[in-house]
Amino acid sequence: MPVRPRSRALVAGVTAMLEKINSGGTGLTAIGQLLDDVQTALGAVGAAASEYVDTEGRVIAATGIVAPFVGMRFDGSTNLSFAVKAGPGVHAYDVREIQPMASQHLMSFGVKRLLVAGAEADGEVVCSVTTVFDDAQLGEPDEESAIMRMAAAVVAHLYTDRVGLPVLGGGSDSPVRGPGRRDVSERSLFVAMASHELRTPVTVIKGYADTLTDHWDALDTSSKLEAVRVMGQRAGELARLVDRLLTSAVGADGDREPASFDLIASLRAATGELPANLRRRLAVALPADLPPASGNRADIQTVLTELVINADKYSASAEPITLTAGSDGHTVYFRVSDRGIGVRPDEVELAFARYWQGDDHGATRRPGVGLGLYLVRKTIERQNGWVSLRPRDGGGTVAEVRLPRGDLSGSGEA
């Protein structure tokens, strides 16, 4: 039987991708390219790769209409997940069969069905490849199955060869689960998290205190009063943080239920309370309004401050940091973008591991304990949202936070 043009293009694309890997390319970049080729070959509207670690899964790469799903966590212990993790093979699902939050997102994009294939490395399915279609009618089953099995086999090869993968776990030298990472005591983790959460308001208070000390005579009365107001507000936040941390230390559940709130108003309020040096760097380009978000409004200040501090840390002071926001059919989001040293493709998930710190690609190492992005992700995931990093076109990094829309019902956990 003659090779169809789409299949021929897929073979050429996979060959080129493997040649790049053999020349030193990274696994996550290769998976992204593979997803593009598979999506085109199958006539799908999107494709994604998801890692499994124990009972958790996470989307690590995606193309097409599911590109915004990168970073989304899902339950890896459901019957469907167990079926995929049972071994290599291709599974076909109606979009209504999968986990509720993912199903709602996909249906809002017009998705009707999915194909999922597991990638097995060292006797264990560690990743899956998913393609999504806006047509409920099956294509040619044999061809679809062959392409999906080939895609999963290529991903399995990348994992077996350890070319920048696994991202979330596995491998004795993995930065996420290797020696010295899994054995962190709960007490040590609590102390580290507490000190890190307290650092944000302390940083703001110190910034304003330094401004008052160094520029008292140059400041007018309104500027001095504003500085004192923010310092008092942050002192109150410190008191609340201490109370919350002490509550969590004794095992109580201090988390609040997500509620509907105005994300734009929250972001504007949060930017107004950043330290003066960060406010000067931040270019705010927010829309006039968005659909409401579902989450904890009080956490937006902490999350935004951490992302801006992170961008400031890894970019030259002459380059602005940009804050933008938007929405789609099921989420609202905001992005913090910089023109710094950039995040390498193989680092975009590792950056969220606790205590993991990237290098400066040959420059001076930055201070910190490697907890900032870990805490940002944990904070947003408690609200059924997700966070991702990606390289920015032209250099730099984009950090994106997505939350469920507050004007839609049924935003359960994925």
Image (tube, rainbow, N blue to C red):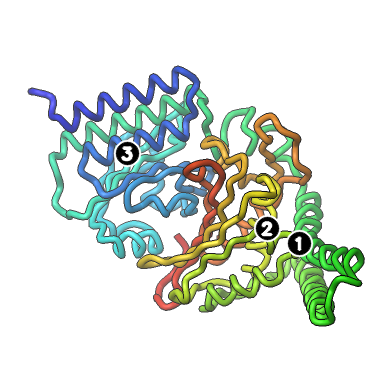
What's the residue at 84%, 81% (across, down)?
221
Q: Which residue is mark 3?
A: 36
Residue 158 coordinates in the image, percent (x, y):
44, 27
Q: Residue at label 2?
A: 306
101 left or right of 248 in image = left
**Label 2 to label 3, Cα distance in Å?**
32 Å
Marks 2/1 in contact by CB < 8 Å: the verdict is: yes
Q: Which of the pair 231/356 is nearer the observer?
A: 231
Where's residue 33, x and y in %? 37, 34
Front one among 247 and 201: 201
**Residue 142 appears in which quarter of the rendering?**
top left
Instruction: Determine contact: label 2, label 3, CB under 8 Å.
Output: no
What mark, if any, has residue 286 been given in the picture?
A: none
Question: Looking at the picture, which amino acid does disc 3 mark?
Answer: Asp
Identified by mark 2, the residue type is Glu
Q: Quadrant of residue 381?
A: bottom right
> x, y percentage for residue 128?
39, 40
Say above or below: 87 vs 189: above
Mark 2, residues whose alpha carbon is within 10 Å: few (<14), some, or many (≥20)? some
Q: Residues within 10 Å of mark 3 (few under 14, many from 20)?
A: some
Name which residue lies at 25% across and 25% down: 11
SS at mark 2? helix
Q: Which circle's residue, 2 or 1, is located before the other in the chain?
A: 1
